[in-house]
């Protein structure tokens, strides 16, 4: 080392503690700063700035304070580093390589630890790389040993980590096992039975939990999402997957709170059917009718009715939007609404012949209907030209075989604002008296 190297070096005191190992850290940040500051006074080192952070050094580029220190050394702000030990600077090859590169470029003159010194000469750089590589090796081996211990524990039937609500860990003779929580275990069993036998929903269970004031081990209320997680957790009937999503299952030694049969019935109850995304659901007659009681728009919604031995059946219902007050207009199903539309068209066809005006969109549908009609009439030896297009039959064809847009266009082609009152269709407002008589 040159005689003036120490006095001309401007040091940054860098102290680090792994955030993953707060309680077991050998030297806290304050202790590192105290020890290195006292050494700097004894050896007449100039500490230009003190920097500290709590981050793991296992991965390269994950420490913002260290990254800024490297940038400042490149800019010439510092030419030396004071730190407690080499592993405070690096436990990975990436960060170690940057330090050695700075030495090769003569921008980093010295790294001084409590018991060693590393400057820009081959032997000291080689020793620095060995010590930091040894720290990396320790980390890697520690990770392998921890994973091996976890696998051994799982093979013995004990799931690592805290158990779900209804159980707790018990330490005995240096070992931990999982036992049933006497205050919550029987409640979890009853929760599964309520869902399996009574079909209770998650919200029903949530209200029951709030009523009996069941809480987590930390004294907090059980959230709805947590209830669904519990209902789907196979740990309660004796099996667990570790890690979750890894595909490796183990048979636990903990006492199960439910049977496999009850758990399977709960999973059947939890099956949900996919809903349409925003803007994807199309209700055929939505927005085309007014409520005859309050004048609000008639909206539609679909519902899935579960069946015991078949797929659920989809039903569409129409009802008043009720934006201002509660309306007494009852719901009407789409099948009954279509029958009402046909009744109205039949009435208007009798009272006002040729009232139905086909729009351009409906002409294609009319052509399809006419071609089918002609084939049927020819088969019956009837001249199709002798019978004009019947609006009622055409409307029935559209409402049963047409597309959603064609059905909507048919209602719009009536050229009248229609309303629904007591599940009957009539003309709205000024035409109401004239059209009510058909029903």
Image (spheres, rainbow, N blue to C red):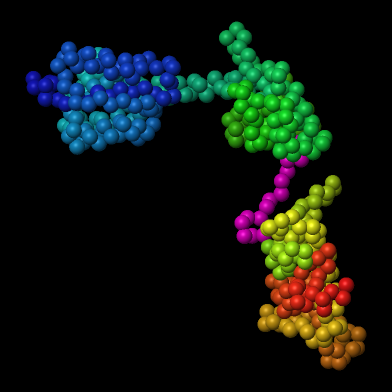
Comparing 320 with 206, the one in front is: 320
Number of numbered discs visible in the structure rendering: 0
User: Which residue appears at 32% of the width and 17% of the height?
Assistant: 30
Relative to 303, is 247 on the left or the right?
A: left
In this view, 425 is above or below 180:
below
* Residue at the left extreme of this rendering: 3
Magenta span: chief secondary structure = loop
Asked whether residue 264 is drawn in magenta, I would say no
The quarter of the picture where the N terminus appears is top left
Can the viewer see residue 198 in this picture?
yes
User: Which residue appears at 74% of the width and 55% of the height?
Assistant: 326
Magenta residues? 266-281
In the rendering, at what x and y percent does residue 215 appear? 65, 25
In this view, 300 is above or below 212:
below
User: Which residue appears at 16% of the width and 22% of the height?
Assistant: 46
The quarter of the picture where the C terminus appears is bottom right
In the rendering, at what x and y percent does residue 352 appear? 82, 85
Relative to 108, is 399 on the left or the right?
A: right
Q: Quadrant of residue 131?
A: top left
Q: In which quarter of the image is residue 419?
A: bottom right
User: Which residue appears at 73% of the width and 74% of the height?
Assistant: 417
Relative to 244, is 74 on the left or the right?
A: left
Comparing 45 with 136, the one in front is: 45
In the rendering, at what x and y percent does residue 165 appear? 66, 25
* Residue at the right extreme of this rendering: 380
Can the viewer see residue 116 in this picture?
no
Q: Quadrant of residue 403?
A: bottom right
């Amino acid at each position: 080392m040159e005689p003036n190297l120490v006095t001309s070096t401007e040091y940054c005191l860098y102290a680090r503690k792994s955030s993953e190992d707060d309680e077991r850290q050998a030297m806290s940040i304050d202790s590192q700063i105290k020890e290195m500051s006292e050494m700097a006074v004894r050896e007449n080192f100039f500490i230009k700035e003190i920097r500290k952070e709590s981050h793991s050094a296992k991965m390269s580029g994950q420490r913002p304070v260290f990254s800024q220190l490297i940038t400042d050394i490149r800019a010439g702000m510092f030419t030396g580093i004071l730190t407690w030990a080499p592993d405070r600077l690096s436990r990975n090859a990436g960060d170690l390589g940057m330090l050695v590169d700075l030495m090769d470029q003569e921008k980093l003159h010295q790294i001084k630890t409590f018991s060693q010194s590393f400057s820009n000469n081959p032997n000291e750089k080689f020793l620095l790389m060995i010590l930091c590589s040894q720290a990396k090796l320790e980390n890697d081996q520690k990770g392998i040993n921890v994973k091996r211990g976890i696998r051994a524990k799982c093979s013995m039937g004990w799931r690592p980590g805290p158990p779900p609500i209804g159980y707790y860990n018990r330490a005995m003779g240096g070992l931990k096992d999982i036992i049933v929580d006497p205050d919550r275990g029987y409640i979890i069993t009853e929760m599964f039975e309520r869902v399996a036998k009574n079909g209770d929903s998650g919200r029903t269970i949530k209200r029951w939990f709030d009523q009996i004031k069941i809480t987590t081990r930390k004294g907090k209320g059980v959230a709805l999402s947590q209830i669904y997680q519990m209902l789907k957790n196979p740990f309660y009937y004796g099996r667990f997957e570790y890690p979750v999503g890894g595909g490796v299952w183990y048979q636990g030694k903990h006492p199960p709170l439910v049977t496999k049969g009850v758990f399977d019935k709960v999973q059947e109850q939890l099956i949900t059917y996919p809903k349409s995304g925003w803007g994807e659901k199309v209700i055929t007659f939505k927005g085309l009718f007014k409520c005859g009681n309050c004048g609000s728009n008639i909206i539609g919604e679909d519902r899935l009715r579960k069946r015991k031995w078949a797929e659920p059946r989809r039903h569409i219902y129409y009802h008043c939007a009720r934006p201002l007050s509660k309306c007494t207009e009852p719901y009407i199903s789409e099948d009954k609404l279509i029958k009402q539309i046909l009744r109205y068209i039949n009435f208007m066809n009798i009272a006002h012949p040729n009232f139905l005006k086909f729009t351009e969109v409906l002409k294609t549908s009319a052509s399809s209907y006419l071609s089918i009609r002609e084939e049927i009439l020819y088969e019956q030896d009837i001249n199709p030209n002798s019978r004009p297009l019947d609006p009622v039959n055409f409307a029935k064809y559209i409402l049963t075989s047409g597309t959603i847009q064609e059905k909507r266009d048919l209602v719009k082609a009536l050229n009248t604002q229609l309303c629904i009152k007591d599940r009957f269709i009539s003309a709205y407002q000024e035409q109401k008296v004239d059209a009510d008589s058909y029903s």
